[in-house]
Image (cartoon, grey):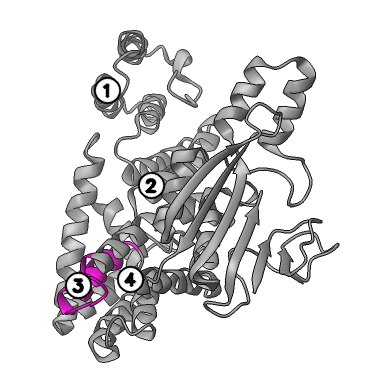
Amino acid sequence: MKLNVGCGRDYRKGYINIDAFDDTVADQMMAAEYMDFEDNTFSHVDCIQVLEHLGAARSIYALAEIYRVLRPEGILLLQTPDMVNSFKSFIKGSEDRRKLTMNWIYGIDSPGMFHRYGFPEELLTLVLREAGFQDIEIDHIDSDSVNPTIQARCRKGDSAIHQSISHFRKKLVREKLVDLQNQIEVLEIETLIQELIEILKSSKADLGKRHIRRILVDSSTCSPRVGQAFLATMSESGIVRVTDAQKYIEVLHELDEAGFVRVLVHLFMEMPILPGRQDDTYQSLKAMAERAVGKILSGNTEASKSLAQTALQVSGWIDNNYFTRAMLEGLSMRVFALGIRAFALNQLEEAENKLLDAIRLNRDSVIAIWNIARVYALKRLTERSLRCYASVKDLIVIQYLRQSRQLLKRIEKEIHAVRQGELEIISNPVHSVP
């Protein structure tokens, strides 16, 4: 049997033709990243001009599904716009040619027709290899046209590891542990997934207790739910014995039920605010969390009680399913935006509270510390303001070396105004570092 993924109106005889958007000729309406076919069903899969519509994150899951439904030694033929030659065509082309090339790069503004991402040769090769495909052959088709295409032909090996990883990704989608529409979240979780995959590969598909413990520790401080799904899938695949994995799955379930991720965010915010020490604070909390998980794993009831008590103290607005550096920075920016709004409306108490939360979430945020320095000055808390300005100066030297001379002059001007009580020049928020 053969499969044509994302057929659009290109119906192929002898294939099962599927599409997620266009039902004109499709045999079945089905998303590439979650297909309703059994393992090892097809000897050949065509995936023609599809990945660019999915984006970086969803493409990972689509390739995992294609790998899953292909038979061992089955062939994948894939085409997607050739980004390098497309940009060359645009740069060298006439006005009419540029318009056509832009449509090829960005797609058409219609459901399922716009392009989310581009895959140059090296990136396409990488994602195919990570999905488990072998003998990858790359060709460049119609390189001088307005529709330059990169084509990959590869085969599926007989890898129990990659088949299990494909099942794991399908479980994440089925149980809604990843939101494929949220590329930032998917790529954040992907960092953890790659760590778990490396543990699996290093075990050579024979997960012992040492490897399972590493999976527990790595996933517990990022996303216990993802860790549960991973171990459950490996148990179902026979890569790890159910009896060996069960204890660790139960600990991850306990951590998830207790809201461990939310507790970590809460504890992170409660740690001392040391401007410029975001990574140190993050690593310190991770180490503390790993020790706590170790105690819970060993059956320490006091550690479990302490976690439950801390969970009761967590602020209701903290609601995250994973704990990573980028998640903290993203949450910080959302809270920062609320602080800026309050500042602009002259609601200085609210602005102070939100900006402090933004700094607690990201101690490296120059812009948040700069704004709270202004807020403190407007509240006539001069010493606090000057301490914040001192932190801003230190961070500017580290993070904005090229612009540091100009920025430091501006900060010194503001410091002078604060000391003189001439606050008009700092009466509005700074939205970004110039």
The front one of 91 and 308 is: 91
Residue depicted at 39% across the width and 69% down the height: 226
The furthest residue to the bottom: 243
Q: CA distance from mark 4 to mark 1?
A: 36 Å
| Residue 393 pos. (x, y %) | 27, 20
| Residue 377 pos. (x, y %) | 37, 24
Report if the CB atoms under discs 2 and 3 are less than 8 Å apart: no
Residue receiving disc 4: 311
Mark 2 residue element: helix
Which numbered tag is attached to residue 326? 2
Residue receiving disc 3: 211
Question: Closer to the observer: label 2 or label 3?
Answer: 3
Q: Which residues are magenta?
A: 202-222
Sequence-first disc among 4 and 1: 4
Residue receiving disc 1: 386
The quadrant of the rendering that contains the N terminus is: bottom right
Looking at the picture, which amino acid does disc 2 mark?
Ala
Sequence-first disc among 2 and 4: 4
